[in-house]
Amino acid sequence: MESSSSKNSLLLLLLLVAGAAGVGTWNYQRHAAAEAAEYRPFKGYATADLDKLIAAQRSEISRLRPRAAGARASRTDARGGGLIGDQVREFERVQRHADRSRALSAQLTDLEVMLDQLEQERAKRGGEGESESARVLRLAFTF
């Protein structure tokens, strides 16, 4: 006949295992839901395509960066004087230059944001070779 202490030890062990399983299940569901809800605009792209897009973005950024810096550095001074019509045309000329500079900066920013998103997606795929059981364990036991 088993002693009372061995029954209590077995019961305690079962409670610990059940508690760990419950916490692991809850944690898995929480992480799986967060992983599914995560915004990943390039999730559907193949890894090789991501690599090509990253290279293309870097190339375009390196081509556009000097142009945008040059446009920001060049200052267009308005020439004064003249009749009101001449002043309006001068204002329009300066305004077009400023618009071009802002457009180049905005385009460069858009490219840099897209590159950052592409690199984040690529980094998330670092564990692409992860087996399903390793994924389950990672989601269940990562806090």
Image (tube, helix red, strand yellow):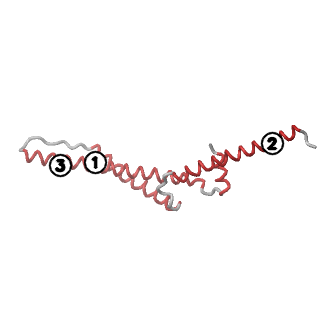
- Compare residues 134 and 85 and report the one nearer the observer: 134
Q: Which residue is mark 2?
A: 11
Measuring 67% from the left and 50% from the top, which residue is drawn there? 137
Q: Amino acid at mark 1?
A: Ser
Which is nearer the N-term, disc 2 or disc 1?
Answer: 2
Q: Are marks 3 and 1 in contact (CB under 8 Å)?
A: no
Disc 2 marks a residue whose amino acid type is Leu
Q: Circle 1 — which element?
A: helix
Task: Kindly identify the amino acid type of the residue bearing the numbered disc 3.
Answer: Arg
Name the one closer to the observer, 21 or 105.
21
* Residue 42: % across, % down: 48, 57
Q: Which of the 4 image quadrants contains residue 6?
A: top right
In the image, residue 129 lies at what x, y percent? 62, 57
Residue found at the far right of this picture: 1
Task: Specify whether 135 is left or right of 107.
Answer: right
CB contact under 8 Å: marks 2 and 1: no
Q: Sequence order check: which comes first, mark 3 or mark 1?
A: 3
The answer for how far apart the CA atoms under marks 3 and 2 are is 85 Å
* Element under disc 3: helix
- Lower sequence index among marks 3 and 2: 2
- Local crowd size for mark 1, using a 10 Å CA cut-off: few (<14), some (14–19), many (≥20): many
